Structure formats: C-alpha cells, structure tokens
Image: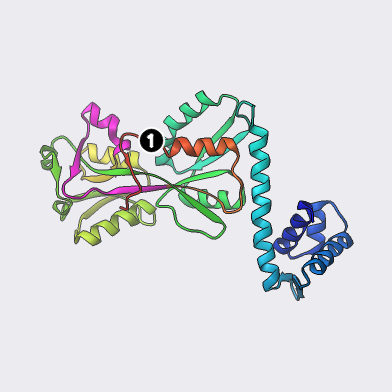
Amino acid sequence: MQIETLKVFCDLVESRSFSRAAVRNDITQSAVSQQIKNLEKRFETQLLRRDGKGVSPTPAGRIFYERSRQMLDGFEQMQLELKAVGQDMSGSVRVSTIYSVGLYEISVVVKTFLKLHPKVRLHVEYSKGTRVYEDCLAGAVDLGIVTYPEPRKGLRIIPLPADKLVLICAPDHPLARRPHVDIRKLAGQNYIAFEKGLASRRALDRIFHEQGIDVRVVMEFDNIETIKRSVEIGAGVSIVPLLSVQKEVQGGSLVQVNFIEKSFYRLLGVIVRSRQPLSPAARKFIELMRRPHQGRAGRKSA
C-alpha cells in the first residue's frame, strides 16, 4: 500500500466526491474507485458508504481515515524537515495578529527572526481578532496570534507566555502615589475600558465580577493606544499589559501600579489549522514567540 493511496482515500472522505478526489490527485474517477475497492478487499471490511449527498465513511472507514490522516501529516512534516537539513532557513511565513500583540509583542520577535534567518520571507499583517481566526481557517496565513485564544473546529492552539496586567493612571491621580494597590480599590473609579465584545473586555469584566468590583466605565475603545491617551489626560484609570506602557511609564506621562496579593495576566496563543504541518521557519518563529521576556510570565490565567 502506497502513501498516494492513503491520500486518495482522505481526499475522498474530505470532499465526499469521487470526481473531486480524482481532480485533487490528477487521476480518473475509475482509478479512485479501484483504489477504494483494493483497500476494502485488503482489510476485508467496507470503508465507505454512498448516501444522498455523496460518500461518507463507515465506522471502520472513520478509523482508517483518522490514522491515514495522521500518517500523511507526519509524512509531509518529514519532507519539510528533510528539505531544511544542511540548508539555510528559507521559505515564507505568513502571520496574522491583533494590533496590540503586533505593536508590543511581535516587533521584537520580527527583528530577531529576520536577523537569524534573513532568507525567510516574513509577512506580518494586523487584523481584528475575528479576522485572524477566519484567515487561519481559510489557509490565508500560516500562523495567527490572538489574546485569550478560543477553541475552534479546525484549529489548534499553541499557548504563549502570558502578559502581566497592570493598572495605569495619570501622574496626578491619587492612586499614582501607591506602589501597589488592591484591585478592589477600583470600585467606583472612572474606568477606561476596551469595547464590549473584545476578548480583553470579556476577560477583564470576568475579573471584576469575580472580585466583586463595580467600576464606572466612562469611555470604551477598541485599541490600547487610545486607552492610554485617555488615561494620560486624567479621564480615568485602566488595566493594560505591562509591555504596552513601558515607553509612557519611562517618559513620565503614565504611572504603572502593580496589584497587591494577586497578579493578573493576559493570555496569548498561536492558532494554526489542525492538520497543517508547520514548516521549519514557522516553527522557529513560534519558538521565538514562546521565549518569556520582561512583562511576560508563564501560562497563568487572568
């Protein structure tokens, strides 16, 4: 039994069509039928059944499909790794990320990656979270990087080190004089929030609910930059990732206050298609993303 036969079977199960499986493998429909008959004869069991919408696997066929898919994915990954042996890293990596991660997380990684692997064509685009998931599922990008990654059918999640969350306020705010603050002190404070529906907003609302805190949301924005500008003019306080405010804190336009007793973190993750073998270049990019640095910690939950 050859690897090509396994691919024909998997393509047939996934497309539910003899004609589409034939096109994918550049063979005739009769050749597809013959290979399926040979498989069923070899294993002495029916692997496929015809229904009104095409073909579908029997229970035995489902087992055969899942094991064949694993072998095909492993074979493709082996080919990628063999091509990389003894060669400088090359190829391309397409990355889609949300704006806040792209501005404060990836910029350092991109510089390091390109310095280490100058022959790799690296393309990074910034999108909203929903678009990152869509692009990954469609195969438009190799890697997606999101906050608070959510399980989706057809995708797998590779956890990244989490971002530490801190309170920020204007230098003349009463809380600015404190080196640490209990998060419950935010009750009743004017608060600059992320827009409803964003993953960061849902996570922070969950923290407030768990801590029994009722903040006074006075403004809502879809990006950290606008939140920081609003906090700088004294419109309220906010909670953001430490990495996103280092420049302003060093310049004195914002004050960072750590939380006492308990720390909170923004979860990050890489999303990729479930059955997508990662190229050596993509694996190297993920390795760099997984290295913890200042402002990031282990995989702690917010």
The percent position of residue 31, horizontal first and vertical second, equals 87, 59
The percent position of residue 93, horizontal first and vertical second, equals 58, 36
In this orientation, which residue lies closer to the viewer: 126 or 299?
Answer: 299
**Residue sitting at 48 percent across and 42 percent down?**
97
Q: Residues within 10 Å of mark 1 (few under 14, many from 20)?
A: some
Q: Is residue 55 above or below residue 171?
A: below
- Residue pointed to by mark 1: 104
In this orientation, which residue lies closer to the viewer: 39 or 296?
Answer: 39
**Residue 175 inside the magenta-drawn segment:** no
Could you tell me how many numbered marks the image carries? 1
Colouring rule applied to residues: rainbow
Q: Could you tell me which secondary element the residue under label 1 belongs to?
A: helix
Residue 284 appears left or right of 174: right
Magenta stretch, residue numbers: 242-268
Residue 35 appears left or right of 178: right
The percent position of residue 195, horizontal first and vertical second, equals 35, 52
